[in-house]
Amino acid sequence: MVSACASLMTSAPDSVATWRDPATLATRRGALLVACAALCWSSGALIVRLVATPPWTTSLWRSFFASVFLALVLWLVRGRGIVGQWRDGGMPVVIAAMCMAVSSTCFIFSLAHTSVANTLILMSTGPYVTGLLGWIVLGERVALRTWLLMGVTLAGAVVMVSDSYLRGTILGDLLAIVMASSFAIATVIIRRHPEIQMAPAAVLATTLTFLVALPLAAPLETAPRDLALLAFFGVGQFGVGFLLFMAGARLLRAAQSSLIGMLEIVLGPLWVWLVLSERPPTASLTGGALILVALLTNTVLDVVTPRRANMTS
């Protein structure tokens, strides 16, 4: 999720601190905040595995706690009700929030039908989908090496889902792809309408997710232990993670945020493996390695290239 959110920051000005700028304190603080956000978000898959609630109930409670928490924070910080902030964004914020709500729902259901590694790694393809949509819809230029790395990512995704049908996990893998694509569409909408503020959009997205899940869930059947985990899922994993990312990403380039955000992709399956001994299948490991190499190469080049440009100017 960190790498997907980082794609929203690509319009940040070039004056943002880099690793070798004098403002290293601000840069390190930003890196620490984004790393903490990745740590928060990496716990999501483990929570979904630990709770005994059905996916719709899990989605309902997570979105409820996240929506209330973020709306309260925004009201305290900005001194305005959340409805007024939604009204400021108009229809674009509603459409973006709907896409984010689809992405959030697909995340829960993908984890219910496939491995944690497949969900998180296929989710990490979102920035490439964003680049493709940005090229089609907004006319944004896509570098040749990005096209090449997109090809590697696509090959990795094909390898990951190659035996999903035989293992009965094809639905979960497809939902992970829908999740990445939905968030990519939200990203393009926000780029096209820069007046959209991410925090109110996130609150609206969680509110919509709650309303959709409400008639399909069984919230009163949730055990106290599960309710406590789901409260952390909404407040700690999503809400606090989101606020930490937004604070840290302002101090970093989008590529730097994406690079640090890869911690989520690595730590998510690790927590589940350590606690529940869930080991990804061979195809997932092979395809996931291709995708991670492509992502790592792309983000490292994005970090190094501006630095070289500044050194030669």
Image (cartoon, rainbow, N blue to C red):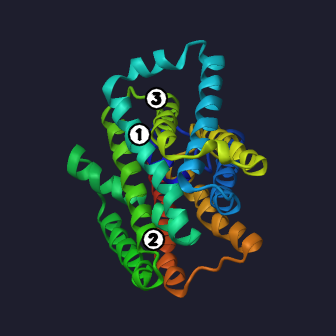
N-terminal label among 2 and 3? 3
Q: Amino acid at mark 2?
A: Ala
N-terminal label among 2 and 1? 1
The answer to whether the residues at label 1 and label 3 have Cβ atoms under 8 Å apart is no
The answer to whether the residues at label 2 and label 1 have Cβ atoms under 8 Å apart is no
What residue would you read off at disc 3? 197
Image x and y of residue 245, in percent: 61, 42
In the image, taking residue 245 as reference, residue 87 lies left or right, namely: left
Q: Residue at x 50, y 59 (%)?
A: 109
Instruction: Tell which residue pokes out farthest to the top in this image.
Output: 79
**Pointer 2: residues within 10 angstroms few (<14), some, or many (20+)?**
many
What residue would you read off at disc 1? 11
N-terminal label among 1 and 3? 1
Q: Quadrant of residue 29?
A: top right
Q: Secondary structure at mark 1?
A: loop
The residue mark sitting in front, 2 or 3, is 3
In the image, taking residue 100 as reference, residue 185 lies left or right, namely: left
Image x and y of residue 176, in percent: 44, 62
Q: Amino acid at mark 1?
A: Ser
Q: Is residue 217 above or below residue 153?
A: above
What residue would you read off at disc 2? 294
Q: Secondary structure at mark 2?
A: helix
Q: Quadrant of residue 194?
A: top left
Q: Could you tell me how far apart the alpha carbons at marks 2 and 3 are, in whole angstroms?
A: 30 Å
